[in-house]
Amino acid sequence: MSSAPEPTAGGRLPALDALRAVGAIAVVVHHVGFHTGATGNAQWGGWLARMDVGVAIFFTLSGFLLFRPWALSVAIGRPRPATGRYLWRRALRILPAYWLTVATCLIVLPQNRPAPGADWLRHLTFTQIYGPGLLRNGLSQTWSLATEVAFYLVLPLIAVPAVGRTWRPVRTVVAACGGLLVTAGWLVAMAVGWLDMGLHTTWLPAYGGWFGAGMALAAAHVALRTGTAPAAFRILDDLAAAPIACWMAAVGLLAIATTPVAGPRDLTEPSPAAFAVKLALYLAVAVLILVPVAFGPPTRIRVALGAAPARWLGAVSYGLFLWHPLMLELIYLVADRPLFTGGLVSTFALTMAGGLLYAAVSYYGIERPLQLLGSQRRAPRPATPVADRTVPAVGTANPEQVA
């Protein structure tokens, strides 16, 4: 066991930065596998096809990180996060680098030229997923970002009733799990033909369960760290004490997802049942990956994930997510390489190298300066005392980590 101190209830969890890097690299592997045609390999191509599990990690992590301040505010009697400030920080974090990526892809890539004004408007406003066939080259990954932005916008509306006026952690966890019901209803609507499997699988309700699971874990985390959790919640700390077991279980579930039970590997539309299985398996994988990093006692693994190299990869992971499809497109253009050809390892190495270079420039030139601007704040109001309850001191680090 490590001697590192346990994070306080509102303190930052630096090891979670590494999970963003894991999600981003998984998405890169997924796209490289598709471009090189390696996902068609009968023996191991399914693993490449299912690396889009990185999106489940992103969504679950976003639900955890962004809902935690609302749960914490009620648990310790502090004012709720201001909606205006929350949205301002989200905008500063997401929009500038994203807008630059959109402009670059629409201008540079010949497949996108000349880009009509409608393409610009849709991609700049995250509305490219609300019609069929609207994603342009180098921007196919932005469907998940558009879905995530939709979650950002609705979170203040659902967070307040979810936490209520008084802290009742079980109620809050149950309310957060309502996202599973939203997804279940969406799947039923697909199954009966009311919704289109080629379009509505990218909309927010399809992933309500992923975001809701992250929110439920956030409420449980706050309850455990403030001493207000029922005994049943301690299973999360117990699971986190065995990270290798959790991650091996996640690998086992992902192995199941590589089979046809989770739908086709290519762009063929899945059946509603296969899509439901894929959502469920990916959710379980994401939770099993997240729990050992967020819960439990400090471990050597968590210390390693919180080390500087892992945190740096997490810091630039948003840029890697944004820029790697452009790098992949440029590799094929410069080499005049047909789609579904090329070496998997060499293409991945070039894509990662170029993607990280673009990501570093984006982070240090755009993202980090604007994050510092967004972190400027007025002096916080004094906390409201919580009657008849002692809670751990809350760290001064900003709990609204970048998701």
Image (cartoon, rainbow, N blue to C red):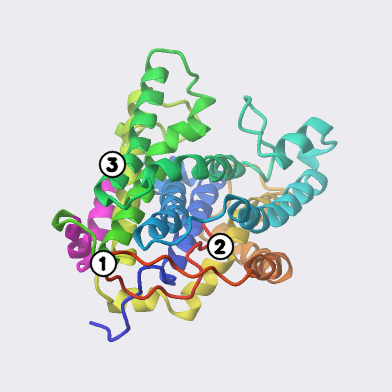
Whether residue 49 is visible to the viewer of this picture, yes or no, is no
Tell me whether circle 1 and circle 3 mark residues in contact (CB < 8 Å).
no
x then y, percent, for residue 243: 25, 66
Foreground residue among 204 and 119? 204
Is 239 on the left or on the right of 185, as rendered? left
Foreground residue among 385 and 371? 385
> Eyeballing the image, is 11 above or below 141?
below
> How far apart are the alpha carbons under marks 1 and 2?
39 Å
Whether residue 356 is visible to the viewer of this picture, yes or no, is yes
Q: Could you say which disc has been placed on residue 174 in the image? A: 3
Secondary structure of residue under mark 2: helix
x then y, percent, for residue 317: 56, 62
Q: Quadrant of residue 378?
A: bottom right
Tell me whether circle 2 and circle 3 mark residues in contact (CB < 8 Å).
no
Residue furthest bottom in the image = 3
Q: Could you say which disc has been placed on residue 389 in the image? A: 1
- Say what amino acid the circle numbered 1 marks: Arg
Q: Which residues are magenta?
A: 233-255
> How far apart are the alpha carbons under marks 1 and 3?
23 Å
- Say what amino acid the circle numbered 2 marks: Ser
Q: Earlier in the sequence, mark 1 or mark 2?
A: 2
Q: How busy is the neighbourhood of tag 2: few (under 14 within 10 Å), some, or many (20 plus)?
A: many
Question: Mostly what secondary structure, the magenta segment?
Answer: helix
Asked whether 235 falls inside the magenta stretch, the response is: yes
Secondary structure of residue under mark 1: loop
| Residue tagged 2 | 317
Q: Earlier in the sequence, mark 1 or mark 3?
A: 3
Q: Earlier in the sequence, mark 2 or mark 3?
A: 3
Q: Quadrant of residue 373?
A: bottom right
- Please identify, in this view, whether the residue under mark 1 or under mark 2 is nearer the observer: 1
